[in-house]
Amino acid sequence: MSQTIYQVDAFTDKPFKGNPAAVCILSKTMPDWWMQSIAAEMNLAETAFLLKQEDGYGLRWFTPTVEVDLCGHATLAAAHILWETEQLGKNQIARFWTRSGLLSGAISEDTIELDFPAEPAIETAAPEFLIEALNVSPLYVGRNRFDYIVEIDSPATLRALTPNMSLLKRVESRGVIITCRSSDPRCHFQSRFFAPACGVDEDPVTGSAHCCLGPYWGPKFGITQVTGYQASARGGYVTVRLEDRLSGNRVHLGGKAVTVLIGELTTAAL
């Protein structure tokens, strides 16, 4: 028995950019401790585990330290592998059963679009430690079921951020999205995402954060499709198509992906 594991750079068409994720397509149910151990061994922001079902695939996501409820880039990576390995035809929809319900993906040429839940934020007071950890003057602070979102004044401030991770880890949320209007004509907004409480100090490109960013920025621009650039060291673009700029509970995340590594877990790991 062997287990193939893939490493995919998501939300990019270039190797070593975007956000890397590992993908395991399982032939049988594996225990939680094993999946968490593999994710820790891979030491990427997320490892996705797929298990074929009659009506799609069960999909779970693990950081090096915890299982999470929603992950965009690892879902993009998983869908990419299903089409690349011809386990799905290019005209077939990828269906994933997850902790966040049914997610799906479709491919057109080399771009994948994921159907995800919208995760709009509600304005709130900044919690203890947040502003101190970021050392910024926020224009807005909001919260959804996963994260805090903080709007700041400029891309220059965004790039210069060096959060105090020890303090940020004490903020009770999955992570913190920092965002601003873009001065680059290729995108409407920019962002960074920090999740030290989940074992990921800074995530390179965070699809699930755009489930919040799209509903936040779309109405500000008065449009139903926006493009974001996540300004991490690796960087990556995510398009967000809203069902409706003022309402709707789904978003469609668009991006590309490239496989950079294919390996086999040895019998010792199984």
Image: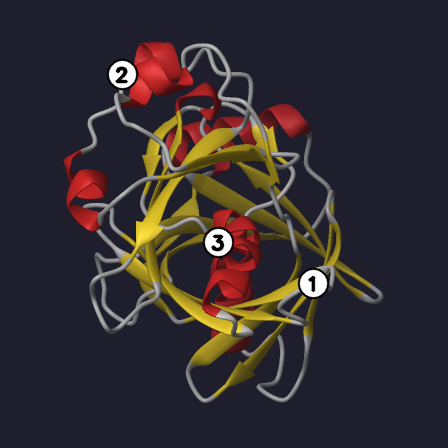
- Which of marks 2 and 3 precedes in the sequence? 2
Secondary element at image label 3:
helix
**Disc 1 to disc 2, how far (Cα)?**
33 Å
Any part of residue 4 in sight: no
Picture residue at 57% right of the left edge, 54% below the top? 211
Residue at position x 37%, y 38% in the image: 44
User: x%, y% of residue 203?
Assistant: 35, 40
Residue at 32 percent across and 14 percent down: it is: 132
Q: CA distance from mark 3 to mark 2?
A: 24 Å
If you read the primary sequence from the N terminus, does the residue marked by circle 1 or circle 3 appear first? Answer: 3
Q: Nearer the viewer, residue 114 or 269?
A: 114
Q: Residue beneath label 2, please?
A: 164
Q: Which residue is labeled 1 in the image?
A: 250
Q: Are dots 3 and 2 in contact, CB under 8 Å? A: no
The three-letter code of the residue at mark 3 reads Gly
Please, what secondary structure does the residue beneath circle 1 have?
strand
**Label 3 Cα neighbours within 10 Å, binned few <14 / some 14-19 / many ≥20:** many
- Of badges 1 and 3, nearer the viewer stands 1
* Of callouts 1 and 2, the N-terminal one: 2
Residue 226 left/right relative to 192: right
Instruction: Kindly state the secondary structure of the residue where label 2 is placed.
Output: loop
Q: Nearer the viewer, residue 267 or 77?
A: 77
Q: Amino acid at mark 2?
A: Asn
How far is mark 1 from mark 3, CA to CA? Answer: 13 Å
Q: Is residue 148 above or below residue 20?
A: above
Q: If the image is split into quadrants, where does the C terminus sit?
A: top right
Q: Residues within 10 Å of mark 1 (few under 14, many from 20)?
A: some
Q: Which mark is residue 207?
A: 3
- Image coordinates for residue 154, horizontal then vertical, percent: 23, 47
Are circles 1 and 2 on residues that touch, CB within 8 Å? no
